[in-house]
Image: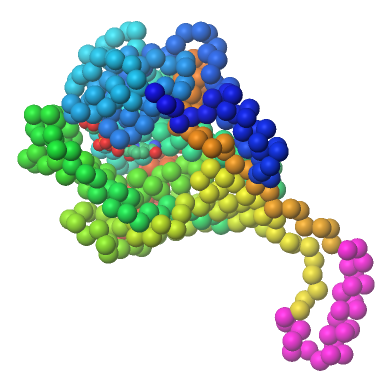
Amino acid sequence: MQSSFITRRDFARLSVAAAAGSSIPLLRPSILAAQTPSTGRKIRFISIGTGIRGCDLLRAARLVPNGELIAIADLYDMHQKAGVEAYGVDVPTTRDYRPLLDRKDIDAAIVAVADFQHRRVVLDCIAAGKDVYCEKPMSHNVQDGFAMVKAVQENKRIFQVGSQRVSNIVYKKAAEIYASGRLGEVSYIEGHSDRNSPSGAWVYPIAPDASPQTIDWTTWLRDAPSIPFDAARFFRWRCFKDYGEGLAGDLFVHLLSGIQCVRGTNQAPNRALSAGSLTHFNDGRDFPDLLATLYDYPGVTLNLHCNQNNAAGEPVIFYGREATMVINGNSLTVTPQDTSPQPEGYSLDGWTTEAKQQYLKEWHAAHPTPAPRLAEVESWSAPPGYNDTADHIATFFHAIETREHVVEDEIFGNHAAIACHMANFSYFHRAIATWDAASQTIKS
Ligand SMILES: NC(=O)c1ccc[n+]([C@@H]2O[C@H](COP(=O)([O-])OP(=O)(O)OC[C@H]3O[C@@H](n4cnc5c(N)ncnc54)[C@H](O)[C@@H]3O)[C@@H](O)[C@H]2O)c1
């Protein structure tokens, strides 16, 4: 099977090409370093949920050689087969993951079930002593998040949430630049994640074979209100409050996790204020197709939006006093700000010529040294085909061996998810959402 990921040889070739032609330095994929298992023992894992994301995770996991998929569990027959295809090895499949958790020869589970199902599946895995990679957003609501934090900590498990930007080499470079202080004081950060297509708005096709015979609907719906089989809800669960969190849980969480990672912070916001609308994809869904949220974090204001009606891109912009840093997909640019002293211009328009000349004479006398040349704009990029999910899985497997906490652990994932829940709380309550850490609740 063809891999979309680059090999060691590709990387060498790309680096030479970059040195010869392109002025944008390519960052070195960390996955290459993760390819040598330290103990020689493989991490034996199962995959629970092999729909869209579960299959992507398995394609990425194939590129991480110190892992070995042992079995697949999914409630939908076609997704089981798709999971086998994605990993490229004929492993056993089942609808019921629980007997797999009893096996002592299995170290870990990669969990990619719908958001409202995270809590139950994660708690089952943790109770069975497994380490867990759980897809983002960590929780469907605040209570679920804290239940998972408690279980992970009491059972001393390795737990990683699946917002793969946290292991992305571009974000790591951005974090290094941020920590160096080169941007100066950053008091404002902006991030978007925009799309303009039915697929971008989760209007996913309904597979022709979907039925109560091919899907275990009763188990799928176990932690949500009981309703008759509804294939649209199975495939488009992101649109509904009972199962997902709309744009905040689907996309804000990536922006928030990436920003937490770059800033080296790990906390919930103090306050959030959302606005938005449902103008185009008015198909019976619960969530808006535009969500904009202003977050008040200690020391920084964050402005995020996700729009399903305009594909303006996915930039994350850090506005510093000394430089602006923009992450756009897998590239990074730092543009220095000119903060050297300048004589006043505009506000002297109301001065007489004589007063102006006097001012300028005094200004130049007070600033005899010419301003230093402004630093060049600098850019970096990940190599073509770079796959940050593979790096994120490699990070997880490495932590299983070393028993060291990962960056995107249960606390980090919970904080990012709380911020998503605050965005929705504000939108639906039409009020400012305030985080009350003492009671672990969102208040208005
Ligand atoms: N990190 C990313 O970039 C990214 C991208 C897409 C989705 N996700 C996340 O991944 C998760 C899955 O999303 P998706 O788009 O793949 O959804 P999906 O509906 O395509 O797949 C989920 C699968 O989980 C299975 N499932 C549910 N409960 C189960 C159970 N008890 N036992 C076994 N299987 C069960 C379902 O049958 C389904 O096949 C979500 O949390 C989503 O937010 C993350």
Q: Dividing the image into 4 quarters, which one contains the N terminus?
A: top left
Q: Residue drawn 50% across and 35% down?
A: 385
Q: Residue drawn 58% across and 23% down?
A: 8
Judge by depth and name the residue closer to the eye, 422 or 380.
380
- Does residue 128 sit above or below 363 in this rendering? above
Please state the horizontal and vertical placement of residue 374, each as a whole percent of the image: 77, 57
Please state the horizontal and vertical placement of residue 76, each as a whole percent of the image: 18, 29
Q: Residue drawn 51% across and 46% down?
A: 329
* Observer able to see residue 120: no
Please state the horizontal and vertical placement of residue 355, each as a whole percent of the image: 85, 88
Q: Which of the 4 image quadrants contains residue 265?
A: top right
- Does residue 387 sit above or below 73 in this rendering? below
Please check the rendered image and state whether residue 254 is part of the magenta-colored stretch, yes or no. no
Q: Which of the 4 image quadrants contains residue 46?
A: top left
Please state the horizontal and vertical placement of residue 425, each as a whole percent of the image: 32, 53
Split into quadrants, the picture shows ligand 1 in the one at top left
Judge by depth and name the residue closer to the eye, 232 or 187.
232
Q: Dividing the image into 4 quarters, which one contains the C terminus?
A: bottom left
Judge by depth and name the residue closer to the eye, 385 or 352.
385
**Coloration mode:** rainbow
216 on left or right of 275: left
Judge by depth and name the residue closer to the eye, 302 or 432.
302
Q: Which of the 4 image quadrants contains residue 133?
A: top left
Magenta part, dominant SS: helix
The magenta stretch is: 346-370
Q: Residue drawn 14% across and 41% down?
A: 231
Please check the rendered image and state whether residue 353 is part of the magenta-colored stretch, yes or no. yes
- Does residue 77 sit above or below 105 in this rendering? below
